[in-house]
Image: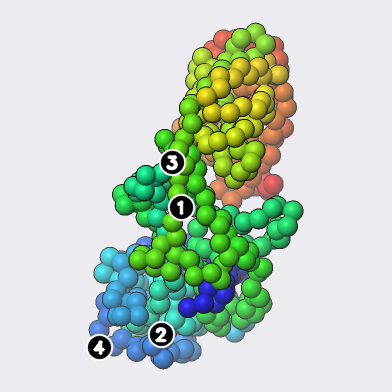
Amino acid sequence: MNRTVWLGALAALALVALTVGLLGGRATRSGAVAAQGGRSGPNAVAARGGGGVREAEADVDGSAQVRGEVVDEDGVALTEGALLLRCLRGDDVSVLGTVRISPEGTFEGPGCRGRVCATLQHPTQSPAEPWMLQPGAETVLRATSLHRLWGVVEAPDGTPVEAATVTFTAAGPADERDPHALIPLSTRSTTTDADGRFSVAWLRKPPCGPCEEAVGGCAELPPMVDRIEAVASASRYASGSFAWDVDEAVGEGPDTPLRIAMGAAGDLLTGQLVDAQGQAYARAYVLARSIDRPREQRRADVDAQGNFEVDGLGAGEYGVRAIADGVELATADAVAGDDVSLMGEPAAGRGALEVSVWGPEGRLAVGATVTGGPFRGAKTDMKGRVRAERPLPGSMTLRVRLGPDVVRRSVEIPADLAETTAHPHRVEVRFTNAASE
């Protein structure tokens, strides 16, 4: 199949996201429903035209179930994935829930007094045509395989590289690329197996059914890139890359994979990061980005003494950035084998920061998510608290999520924070019933 046809594939994710977003304001019922494993049988509804099922008006009790089996084009049951179920009544669409496909390929979920639309969530399969389910009848849903991009990552001597990370980006100079164009692949990164191989799906525009039409019609395809670059990175090797036009016959199958050659790594880039008083920073890390190859970047954590080592660097100069708690501390230019001394401009943190989160009912909130400053998705404990040692002084904004609600809180960490962590700087975040960003 010509790769230009595959460009329509990216709409799969875009349209599902658009549909769910549009439904958010119109949904009358939502929630996850555990699959109970229905069975196919003599009452199964035959698929029409080799894919999908008959459309039928359903005027049944809302507790009626839809059930059936999901198979591929060869009739083999799918053993993973899920179905997003929605109810269509007139022009109103509501979310019924998401049901998992069982290891036997069966599913069972809630019905409604209308027609039930099913959207497949699967890494390699897509519906052959719109899926409509009839409550009370068992249905066979037929899917078709997504075309795939195959590739292999090799070391300088030609041997396969296991556990290499392969990242896909738009190729070409940044000022010549459409910033809104998307990549028509199911994922932006993947890893290689023991044979150095990887495989990702080209996206296909899913069928447009009655539910999509009811929530504003079938969306036009978003703009997509016409040239892709795959960058492979792995420890002990310099990064390798391969760029190609989307309509080129590259990576057509496992026998003709796209090949990415890794380079020979130079010596370690070593160094130390401290503040003006010689103190190390907590949660600091170093990024080394190639000046000649901007998509090539390596990261290394800074230890408690301020030392770091960056491996996998290739030829040429790298821009080095030291970062902690979202703050850039110092920069330098270096090449593989250099030993770099970095001095952070802000003083290293001291003491501790403790954040307490209170729910709208006036109780300490367990499991709230805190991001910003020294926190990266930290969860509050059984006492509704998160804690960070040695936060950097200065201003920061915390973003706290509790269920669907989000509160932003500006925090100032004083430079003279007590050195002992027994007396942390305490901050409270309180939710109300109207809490929102």
Residue that appears at 38% across and 80% down: 142
Residue position for label 3 = 234
Picture coordinates of residue 16, whole percent (x, y): 55, 68
What's under tag 1, amino acid-wise?
Ile
Residue position for label 1 = 260
Residue position for label 2 = 51
Which label lies toward us, 2 or 1? 1
What's under tag 4, amino acid-wise?
Pro
Left or right: residue 239 compared with residue 316: left
Mark 3 touches mark 1? (CB < 8 Å) = no
Is 156 rendered above or below residue 220? above
Picture coordinates of residue 337, whole percent (x, y): 52, 24
Left or right: residue 423 compared with residue 347: left
Q: CA distance from mark 2 to mark 1?
A: 37 Å
Give the farthest residue toward the front: 157
Which label lies toward us, 3 or 4? 3
What's under tag 2, amino acid-wise?
Gly
Residue that appears at 62% across and 78% down: 218
Q: CA distance from mark 1 to mark 4?
A: 51 Å
Which label lies toward us, 3 or 1? 1
If you read the primary sequence from the N terminus, does the residue marked by circle 3 or circle 4 appear first?
Answer: 4
The label on residue 42 is 4
If you read the primary sequence from the N terminus, does the residue marked by circle 2 or circle 1 appear first?
Answer: 2
**What element does badge 4 sit on?**
loop
Mark 2 touches mark 3? (CB < 8 Å) = no
Left or right: residue 385 compared with residue 251: right
**What element does badge 3 sit on?**
loop
